Image (tube, rainbow, N blue to C red):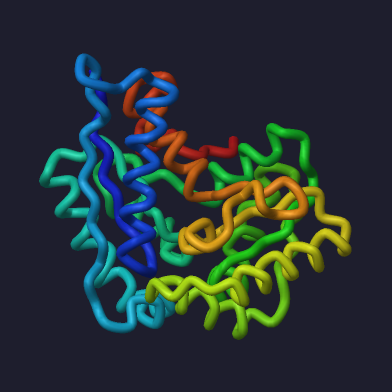
């Protein structure tokens, strides 16, 4: 049996499409998907609302966007849901509690993978709300890892919004690489790319230290669950810490 994946997209429509394409590529490369073996069935929902990121900062406003998307995916038949947007995880607990199917957590999956590779300190490149609300720091203790954020988050937010509009420039690429260098000088052992827009501009292997694309890690986990390589968790057993 191949499970069906429900996907809620990110800041810009291209990020959600990029995430979905990764599922197809991972299916082909790691699971032999092709003519005789299908890729997992998935449905992508990209919230089409004005001021999406601004709305995500307010609980009621955010849930008025996210919960209807969850219901649509459930009604279509998704066996579990992946949210390809780090900032939306500000309300992860609310969404996971409201959903009738398991909802994967991009933060936990990324930190779990980074820790498994032996890293204890990781630098964070992410959207302003993800950094300001310390979304990765909220769960770092579960994996005995320290997350250190980049600074000047207003400037980084402007850069990411340009990427979301499809404006890719060498200047912005250089800025991201300089931010990674600054984090490296602070002693971090790796970088987590905690915004699904970042890999549209800079590939992980272009950074000056090991870089982990949180979106790609989530796509890997989702695909492995869909094919049964990882057991589909029950809604109530997901990310239990005791």
Give the camera-side residue of 56 and 101. 56
Eyeballing the image, is 74 above or below 195? Answer: above
> Which residue does the image show at 30% across and 69% down from the upper left?
63
- Across and down, in percent, residue 24 comes to 33, 35
Q: Residue at x 70, y 65 (%)?
A: 177
Residue lying at 29% horizontally and 49% vertically, measured from the top left: 7
Task: Say if 37 sits above or below 11 in the image.
Answer: above
- Nearest to the observer: residue 95 or residue 49: 49
Q: Residue furthest top?
A: 36
User: Hey, which quadrant is residue 233 in on the image?
Assistant: top left
How far across and how far down the image is residue 12, in percent? 35, 68
- Return the x and y of residue 168 as percentages of the image width and height: 48, 71
Label total for image: 0
Q: Can you say which quadrant of the picture contains the C terminus?
A: top right
Would you identify the image quadrant in which residue 39 lies? Answer: top left
Q: Is residue 19 left or right of residue 117?
A: left
25 or 230, which lies in front? 25
Above or below, 39 relative to 150: above
Q: Residue at x 37, y 52 (%)?
A: 18
Front in this rendered view, residue 210 or 224: 210
Identify whether 176 is placed above or below 153. above
């Amino acid at each position: 049996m191949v499970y069906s994946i429900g996907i809620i997209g990110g800041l810009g429509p291209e990020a959600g499409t990029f995430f979905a394409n990764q599922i197809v590529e991972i299916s082909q490369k790691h699971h032999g998907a092709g003519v005789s073996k299908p890729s997992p069935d998935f449905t992508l929902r990209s919230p089409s609302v004005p001021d999406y990121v601004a709305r995500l900062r307010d609980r009621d406003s955010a849930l008025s966007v996210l919960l209807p998307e969850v219901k649509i995916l459930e009604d279509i038949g998704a066996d579990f849901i992946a949210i390809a947007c780090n900032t939306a995880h500000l309300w992860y607990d609310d969404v996971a509690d409201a959903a009738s199917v398991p909802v994967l957590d991009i933060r936990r999956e990324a930190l779990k993978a980074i820790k498994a590779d032996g890293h204890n300190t990781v630098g964070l490149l992410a959207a302003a709300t993800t950094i300001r609300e310390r979304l990765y720091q909220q769960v770092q203790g579960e994996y005995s890892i320290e997350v250190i954020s980049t600074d000047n988050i207003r400037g980084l937010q402007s850069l990411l919004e340009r990427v979301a509009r499809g404006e890719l420039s060498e200047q912005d690429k250089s800025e991201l690489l300089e931010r990674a260098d600054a984090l490296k000088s602070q002693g971090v052992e790796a970088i987590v790319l905690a915004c699904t827009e970042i890999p549209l501009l800079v590939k992980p292997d272009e950074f000056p230290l090991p870089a982990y694309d949180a979106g790609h890690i989530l796509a890997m986990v989702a695909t492995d669950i869909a094919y049964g390589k990882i057991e589909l968790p029950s809604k109530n057993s997901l990310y239990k810490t005791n």
